[in-house]
Amino acid sequence: MSAKTAKAEIHPMEDLLRMDRIPHIWCPTCGIGTTVSCFISALEQIDTPLDDVCVVSGIGCAGRVAGYIKLDSFHTTHGRPIPFATGLKLANPKLKVVVISGDGDLIAIGGNHFIHAARRNMDITVICINNFNYAMTGGQVAPTTPETAKTSTSPYGCYEHPFNIPYLADACGAVYVARWTALHIRRQTKAMVEALNKPGFSVVEVITPCPTLYARRNKLGDGLSLMKFYHENAEIRHGADTRDVGIAFQEKIICGKFVDRDRPSYLECLDRRHSMVLGDKYVKYGERCEDDGD
Amino acid sequence: MAKATKKVRLKKANPKGVLTGAHYLDGDHACCEGALAAGCRFVAGYPITPSTEVVERFSSRIPLVGGMFIQMEDEIASSIAIQGAVWAGKKAMTVTSGPGISLMMEHVGLAVMLETPCVFVNVQRGGPSTGLPTLPGQADMMQARWGSHGDYEIIAISPNSPQECFDLMIDAFNLSEQFRVPVFFMMDECVGHMTEKVIIPEADEIEIYPRRYTTKPPGEYLPYEPDEDLVPSMVKAGDGYHFHITGLTHDEQGYPVMSADCQEKLVHRLLDKINKNADKIYQNIEWELEGAEVMVLSYGISSRVSLRGMAMAREKGVKTGMFRPVVVWPFPEKRLKELAKKVKAVVVVEMNYGQIYYEVDRLVGSTTKVVLLPHGGGTVHDPKVICDAIVEAAK
């Protein structure tokens, strides 16, 4: 390749990445970048105009995703992207609101918001990047850390029971729940497309390698070794009972689409109730959203 | 009403939200009507005494006006859901009392950092902790100012009647829009639950400060490039700007920059945009100060109780007048200094152990006698005690 052609080469996702912020902060062979690529591929496959797509993140490694995607993007506080997203969506229902954040952010400090958004069937998509630890702060134990795994605050091995995220989401009322690993590029992307197209609360959990902290402390090798591990240990089981998809240390990772059902969303329920009780007096939330702000 | 900068044209209230007429309302209900008249169309809240009536009324009124109420899972969620709503184009508030405000502090900081215009209503009760849920307090005044971490300035307004709960809510929203800052509406249980006549004017008599939307096209717009008054212009989600905002220290583009220089520039502007514009924010009431020997400084419900104590002191021959900061933060430093020179003593009457007294003493204590008349909350001051303090201070 000549120098001239090399110079003209552009990143195929440049339109949707903040190239002025690249290089990103993620470690080599971290799985978050892969998830971002899959998400951008998914955006190219959905019907929603991209101007209407909002990305909301919390805090942590995965919390930085919002900062690299060239859409209306919000880097909020730790654990709170879901209630911020709830405000965005309810204030302007035409927006397609996506939360991309980590397991600690969404399931520990943000766990209460996660379960209530699922219960309400709030019309947002949550992409939960699960690397089994708090990576940004140095690899501490998380509610997703498998039992016996070592982290900086479980130096003798984790002894807590971890959350099984698909089961949690399912039990709380999510209408779409899937899990894939960073290895499953095509399937992960497809799950994101399905989740984005699905009305209601949809969840895609992505298991990603954290080579710098989780893998190093547990002597799991480099990023490539982890991908090999996923290749050998990920088992696709669509429609699996979510009670059976918990993750044990270095054991099988059950992947697939576990939940895909229909349930009226928060806004549908609100509209139905208010229309029924108030009739013509009901002024729909969205009708004035263009001019209410000023 | 908030004063407009030169280029801003104030709008008139949307009549849909204005319940014009004479009403008999308590402060909580009047506060809700003030918010609706101001254009608030989004409330996220969590129930807490003695503020609950505000959201109860809002949840009943909003489906008839067009907007959204959501009862969130906690105060933390409420205080950030309103910010999502603001960035999607709504005017928004949350309503709570002390324990809830403690939980919301995280997002007071976020609102300061993102420069999200929004209103936090705090119907104060006795604290600390669960304290006195059904009884009044005024001990969240310093929390309103600096309860979240980091350096910042906010605006806090303290109404003392249901009528003011209506009128000043409009100012609260206008100021939040003008300066893109969270505004605290510091009611208390007495003001919230006191029922009085409230006159709601015609919509076209209510001036509304419009959101400071940018006129620049995408590509040219920088989310944190300040205007002349140090306040940046806004955009909202869905308008094609593809903007980014973060709670991290950020540059004018909204991108995180982890440097002391960027921190200095950003935080200094956040302080300056309030402090240097303070003359446009102050609202004080001066009453009977001409020739007064003793100046009572009080706010909220305590200012009304003080009026009775002052009347009793006057019967005893002490000339006394009142200085009431309606906007408590930023504190009216300059005016207080001018007035304090003319009196023998300043008596600070407040339902806490000296939160505003410390500010007054810091400002004028070296030249004028400053007396604190504290109260732990649970009920209001006995006017006789106020009278005695005034008489004593005059000696």
Image (tube, coloured by chain):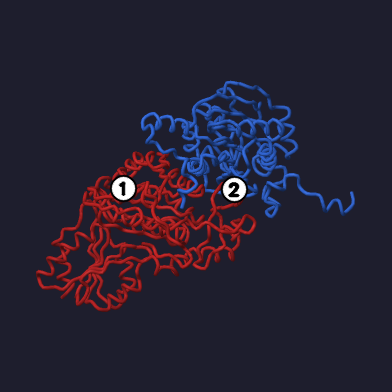
Chain colours: A blue, B red
For label 1, the crowd category at 10 Å Cα-Cα, with few meaning under 14, some 14 to 19 and many 20 or more, is some
In the rendered image, residues at marks 1 and 2 fall on the same chain: no
Q: Chain of mark 2?
A: A
Report whether A82 appears left or right of A41.
left
| Residue at disc 1, secondary structure | loop
Q: Chain of mark 1?
A: B
Q: Is residue A182 above or below residue B292?
A: above
The image shows residue A41 at horizontal and vertical percentages of 70, 38
Farthest residue, direction left: B316
Q: Nearer the viewer, residue B13 or A174?
A: B13
* Residue at left offset 47%, top offset 65%: B273
Q: Amino acid at mark 2?
A: Asp
- Residue A162 in view of the camera: no
Mark 2 and mark 1 in contact (Cβ < 8 Å)? no
- Residue A202 in view of the camera: yes
> Where on the picture, by quarter, is residue A217?
top right
- Name the residue carrying label 2: A72
Farthest residue, direction right: A2
The image shows residue B305 at horizontal and vertical percentages of 19, 59
Report whether B39 appears left or right of A25.
left
**Which quarter of the rendered picture does the C terminus of chain B lie within?**
bottom left
Q: Nearer the viewer, residue B378 or B310?
A: B310
Q: Nearer the viewer, mark 1 or mark 2?
A: 1
Q: Amino acid at mark 1?
A: Leu
- Name the residue carrying label 1: B19
> Where on the picture, by quarter, is residue B348?
bottom left
* Residue at left offset 17%, top offset 64%: B386
Q: Nearer the viewer, residue B390 or A141?
A: B390
| Residue at disc 2, secondary structure | strand
The image shows residue B173 at horizontal and vertical percentages of 40, 55
